[in-house]
Amino acid sequence: MQDKEVEDLDLKELIQAVVNKIGPKYSGDETKVEENFKNYLDNFDKEYYTHLKEKVKEIPLLINVFRKLIDEIFELNEFQLAVLQKQVSIENELLKNLTSDQIQLLEQLQKCGNILNSEMVEQAFIFGYSTAVELRDEAIKQYPQNKNE
């Protein structure tokens, strides 16, 4: 995207252009997302000595909730919009002085960063859910008389 093109975009178009450039990971293969979720549950089980992977049967529901969360994240507030505009401005200024090889390296670096961020968000979501399930189960074991309340 050239500098002039960015300047001519309205805010919604700018956000969509950034989303397109980032390439949302979550619009892809449902099987891959489910596999990732199961791997995160495995990791949670290993880390905290639980057996959540055996108990959690809501993976399709979790995937849908997670996708809704991602959709909501892309509904930016004023602060996020301001930061996004500043980021685009900095990127445009940087791109003015880079060679085409450097631009390609920067794009690869950004893609790697986006992948890592996506993985961390996904893992944080599953670990948060796993923690809630484990806390619920422990509370039920400790206070079985209150199970139906």
Image (tube, rainbow, N blue to C red):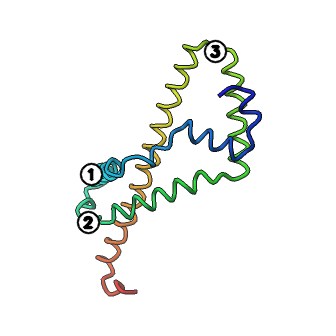
Q: Which mark is residue 42?
A: 1
Report the residue at 54% width, 37% height from top. Answer: 22
Circle on res. 55: 2
Residue in the image at 56% along x and 40% along y: 20
Please give left or right for residue 109 compared with residue 132 in the image: right
Q: Secondary structure at mark 1?
A: helix
Q: Nearer the viewer, residue 114 or 147?
A: 114
Instruction: Pinpoint residue 74: horizontal percent, then vertical percent.
Output: 59, 51
At x 72%, y 35%, the residue is 86
Give how far across and how far down residue 38 sits, in percent: 29, 53
Q: Residue at x 42, y 58 (%)?
A: 128
Three-letter amino acid code at the position of disc 3: Leu
Depth check, mark 3 against mark 2: the one in front is 3
Callouts 1 and 2 close, C-beta under 8 Å? no
C-alpha distance separating marks 3 and 2: 52 Å
Which label sits in the foreground, 1 or 3? Answer: 3
Q: Is residue 132 found left or right of 83 in the rendered image? A: left
Q: Which residue type does callout 1 highlight?
A: Asp
Instruction: Name the N-terminal-most of marks 1 and 2.
Output: 1
- Identify the secondary structure beneath mark 2: helix
Q: Which mark is residue 98?
A: 3
- Residue 123 or 98: which is nearer the viewer? 98
Q: Is residue 92 above or below residue 144?
A: above
Q: Nearer the viewer, residue 120 or 27?
A: 27
Q: Quadrant of residue 72?
A: bottom right
- Locate the N terminus and report the quarter of the image it occupies: top right
Cβ–Cβ below 8 Å for labels 3 and 2? no
Type of amino acid under label 2: Lys
User: Image quadrant of residue 52?
Assistant: bottom left
Kind of element beneath mark 3: loop
